[in-house]
Image: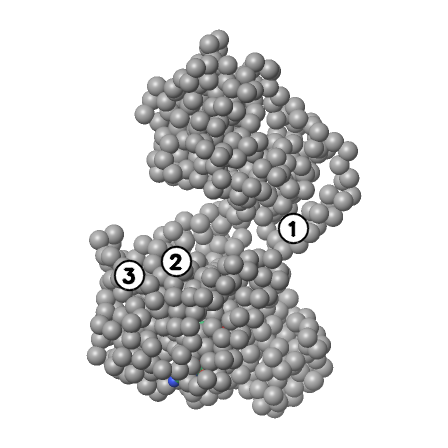
Amino acid sequence: MSQYVTVARQGEIAVVTIDNPPVNALSLHMREPLYAALTGLRDDAGVAGIVIACAGRTFISGADITEFGTPKALQEPNLPMLCALLETMPKPVVAAIHGTALGGGLELALSCHFRVADAKALLGLPEVKLGLIPGSGGTVRMPRVVGPQKALSMIVSGNPIGAKDALASGLVDQVATGDLVADAVAFARSKAGAKPVAVRDRADKIQNVDLAAFDAAIGDATKKSRGLEAPLAAAQAVRNALTMSFDEALKAERATFVKLVQGDQSRAQRHLFFAEREAAKVPGIGKDVQPRPVKKAGVIGAGTMGGGIAMALTNGGIAVTILEMNEDALKRGLGVIEKNYTTSVSRGSLSEEKKAERMGRLKGTTDYADLADCDLIIEAVFEEMAVKKDVFGKLDRIAKPGAILASNTSYLDVNEIAASTSRPQDVVGMHFFSPANVMKLLEIVRGDRTAPDVLATALAVGRQAGKVAVVVGVCHGFVGNRMLGARNDESEALLLEGASPQQVDKAFTDFGWPMGPFAMWDLAGLDIGWRNRKAQGKTAVIGDALCEMGRYGQKTGKGVYIYEAGARTPKVDPEVDALIEAKARERGINRRDISDEEITERTLYPMINEGAKILEEKIAARASDVDVVWTNGYGFPIGKGGPMFWADLEGLKKIVERLEYWHGRTGKDVFKPAPLLKRLAESGGRLAA
Ligand code: NAD
């Protein structure tokens, strides 16, 4: 007996209870007594069946992440040994699953003969999200239990399924109706006496599989993997389960797992996994800082962002009152929200009841007085300081004491906005990304005078709305848009000097981005940048010229590219090529061939450089926060871990050398290496450590 694993008897059935808080991870100190307990029960003639259950809030939720990369992870008895032991048990073993059975936890359960689950349980193999595949038989046993197609979709997506789905697909044998352990004991008793069939010997679901159809399903399932190795490797591992013997497939799975775990992509994805957890820890905001309660929120402006923010909040269970300038604008904004929900219902991703519930929490108004009892008010009006100040002045007059006043500004100075109120301690930036009901990122902008509990509240609201929040400091564009700005100028310069938009965009998609900078301009609307530049007295040769021609991007059917009616696929437009050539000629630029390498050096390296400046200025607390911003808000490929992690892989010395070269050649500030970058390059240090 141990503190982590205890055995109790209910007649001839033994109940093994694992108690390794907080999530019953597969730590070595739990594996050891579990292995010993199971060996003892195997040889105990008085035991006719075994139930494996967990204390606390969940079944085994996976590997012990603190053992990642340490010898402890593999130290015997390791998970493959536990699985093999379970599988050779001469008496039925039943896993009693509540909470979440994920990764190694589910692999262990799959090695039992039977599974009984609580109605609210979630079961999944999420390894692919860390750039891995299951390494203890998950890919070989799962198809035997649920069939190849279901196994493929579960393992390639990494998404867990609920108990109902698990019962329908055969992953669990019974959903508990009463007490889970009592039901599992009764189930084990009903199977006692007969020799149980091990999952390794179950072949009915993997016989006579149509491999051509399965390969087509692999094509579908991995379509969006964009250069990631793990989804393809996962699909191949499930395929091996169909074409190889159990032991061969198991060996192949292990070899792939070991290869992936040592590779850069999985390192990058594990870096991001920890980075997102780390981002929630904000310097100066300890556990003692209590968030203010937020039951009711106000949103000002029902445009692109206001509508999305209102949806994100009501999705998270917060009541929302949305305010517009007049009835027409309000009606239009609420109409867009309603339409978005209707689309989700027609796609099957939202039920009618959920839609009604979410819309039921939403109210519209044109009267500021209706916001007087809001705990939080988020402003999403036009990006102009005068308008923002006017709105915050009004909020200052009507909002109740202690209400949090937030701005969704993309660039503006949150301290200046705060100073336009009598309560700067209650003002904070909450910068959502478009579409705000979908994009995960939330930049929380900490003003000089923002109170700690206001930050804690913004973090809590972000979590409730399903966002990944990163706290940043005040500067033009904060972390994300400021780094984006560093690449935008050069994207244009590359066009003038000889690259085509499609060449630049292809270099980006080859790198793993979902789209390149020009396709992104068209998607976001070129007029946004144009307005922003005008406000700052800046110009952009190509961007401005396109806007002057009325080419605002997808919304006008033409931008950098041309779009066929209703389509979103960019097509090359000779008119734009001619425009670029003419603008180059006007400037006396001799266009030349540009290599993909040059595109990378001139667009991504300035971003890295800007990121280093952001760290120096303490706008971001740590490099991993920058990576969280870019992977969750801008589509930076997760297999490369974010710009700071990738910079370390690329080599800081090389980056500094090339920045210096381009600085010498162009004289542009974006290339002037940040002192931090130079220092690290010289000392052999790393940005993301
Ligand atoms: P938008 O033009 O789509 O919406 C602005 C809405 O605010 C309009 O419906 C307008 O009627 C309303 N409005 C303007 N002044 C108002 C006032 N005084 N009172 C009440 N309502 C008022 O603009 P958007 O794209 O939603 O941007 C809003 C804010 O969000 C800006 O600060 C912008 O920088 C920021 N933002 C935009 C994006 C984006 O991708 N569009 C992303 C992040 C942040």
Q: Nearer the viewer, residue 172 or 577?
A: 172
Q: How many marks?
A: 3
Relative height, residue 145 to residue 543 (above, below): above
Alpha-carbon span between mark 2 and mark 1: 31 Å
Residue 667 visible in image: no
Q: For the residue marked with disc 3, what is the amino acid?
A: Pro
Which residue is drawn at the image coordinates 53% and 40% (left, top)? Answer: 163
Say the numbered circle drawn on residue 464: 2
Q: What residue type is labelled 2?
A: Gln
State the residue at coordinates (46%, 14%): 12
Work out whether residue 45 or residue 430 is closer to the camera in this orientation and state it: 45
Which quadrant of the frame does ligand 1 lie within? bottom left
Q: What element carries label 2?
A: helix
Tag on residue 222? 1
Type of residue at label 1? Thr
Most foreground residue, 530 or 586: 530
Question: Disc 3 designates what residue?
Answer: 293
Q: Is residue 222 left or right of residue 529?
A: right
What is the distance, in whole Å, between disc 1 and disc 3 at their CAs? 42 Å
Q: Position of residue 389 (x, y in %)?
A: 32, 84
Q: Quadrant of the N terminus?
A: top left
Q: Which of 150 and 441 is in front in this view?
A: 150
